Image (spheres, helix red, strand yellow):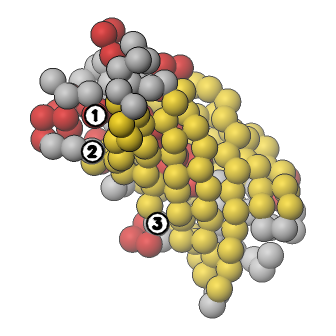
Amino acid sequence: MKTRFFAPAHALLAALAIATGPVSAQQKLVPAQSEISFTSRQMGVPVDGKFKKFDATIAFDPKKPEAGNIAFSIDLTSAQIGDSETMAELAKPGWFDSKRVPMATFQSTAVKAAGPGKFDVTGKLNIKGNVRDVVVPVTLTQAAGATTATGAFVVKRLEFKIGEGDWADTSMVANDVQVKFKLALTGVAAL
């Protein structure tokens, strides 16, 4: 059994953070140009992964961030990390339990401006039925009519019961998982 499956949990959180980018009724996430990745540490060594399937519903005006609403879903079965043995382990109940709970979700509860093109998106992250409040810092950039939302945040895997039992030992697999995202969005108003 390999320990590289800890990272996907954090990746999921990263994906949720990415959902904090702006979009309104006509706003859309462009999955083919977006990415959600995560990095965990196993015995001090970084282990990288990513989610291949995710979606978002976004209603956001950069000039009125407090009225924004961001919802994000991540398909836990789409986590990519390591080899097929590690991937099979990740789907088990002690990790993502993706056969029973295939999706992780994020729903914003508040959006605040944090500087030019910067926003703090607060919301509820739900992984395996474990719900926690998270704050996701998001930076928006715009060029040629396209908007990109980027950011990174840390998720505590044990708060979401990812890596239970023997894997709860943080000297083997760190509790902190860094989630990074780059989301391509269309239809967002000018900054």
Amino acid type, callout 2: Ile
Picture layout, residue 125 above or below residue 70: above
> Residue at horizontal 33%, vertical 16%?
167
Residue at image position (68%, 80%) is: 142
Q: Which mark is residue 81?
A: 2
Amino acid of disc 1: Arg
Q: Is residue 127 left or right of residue 24?
A: left
Which of the marked residues, 2 or 1, is nearer the chain's N terminus? Answer: 1
- The secondary element bearing badge 1 is classed as helix
Label 3: which residue? 34
- Crowding around mark 1 (Cα neighbors within 10 Å: few <14, some 14 to 19, many 20+) is many
Q: Secondary structure at mark 3?
A: loop
Q: Position of residue 64 (x, y in %)?
A: 87, 63
Answer yes or no: do the residues labelled 2 and 1 have beta carbons within 8 Å?
A: yes
Q: Quadrant of the N terminus?
A: top left
Place of residue 137 in the rendered image (x, y in percent of width and height, measured from the top left): 70, 50
Residue hosting label 1: 4
As drawn, which residue projects farthest toward the left? 85
Locate residue 16 relative to residue 87 in the image: left or right. right
Which disc, if any, is residue 167? none
